[in-house]
Amino acid sequence: MKTTYYEVHLSVAFTHEEKQIIRQRGLLKTKLLDRRPANAKNDARDDKFELRVGHLMDERTDRFLCATPSQAKIYEENLLDVLGQMKVWLDDNAETGTRTVVEF
């Protein structure tokens, strides 16, 4: 029997500054999403499928299998939400490197 799966590909290009923030703050093992692919065996450990920041470093492509096109779209939306939150957090933790002068 053939089974059709729908694959979602993710590749993230972090800036040099974002990579430094990730490494300095020890975020490589930070979990972004709990997930379980459509072809996972019933007895497989859930932590084996977690998406972590370290999986996205160095522009490695992450591939995830979904059973239906609808599930693939929902997964894509979840990815975009999580990555948007991560981008905001990285921007907030970036050192601006500029000085502010206040005159009295």
Image: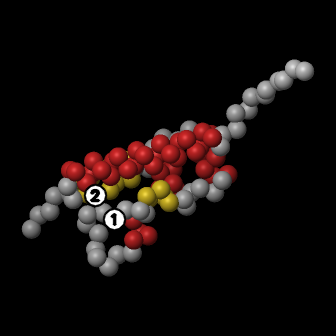
The residue lying furthest to the right in this view is: 104
Q: Left or right: 3 with respect to 51?
A: left
Q: Left or right: 9 with respect to 17?
A: left
Amino acid at pointer 2: Leu
The number of discs equals: 2
Q: Nearer the viewer, residue 97 or 85?
A: 85
Is the residue 83 above or below the residue 28 in the image? above
Q: Are marks 1 and 2 in contact (CB under 8 Å)?
A: no
Looking at the image, which residue is at 29% across and 69% down?
A: 40
Q: Left or right: 18 with respect to 72?
A: right
Tag 2 residue: 65
Looking at the image, which residue is at 21% across and 59% down?
A: 67
Q: Nearer the viewer, residue 8 or 77?
A: 77
Looking at the image, which residue is at 37% across and 62% down?
A: 35
Q: Secondary structure at mark 2?
A: strand
The residue lying furthest to the left in this view is: 1
Is the residue 101 above or below the residue 6 in the image? above
Q: Identify the image quadrant of the N terminus.
A: bottom left
Q: Which mark is residue 36?
A: 1
Where does residue 14 sit, x and y in percent of width and height?
53, 41
Q: Which mark is residue 83?
A: none
Q: Left or right: 100 with respect to 27?
A: right
Looking at the image, which residue is at 47% across and 56% down?
A: 32
Q: Residues within 10 Å of mark 2 (few under 14, many from 20)?
A: some
Where does residue 71 sit, x and y in percent of width and height?
25, 54
Any part of residue 18 in sight? no
Where does residue 49 sit, x and y in percent of width and height?
39, 65
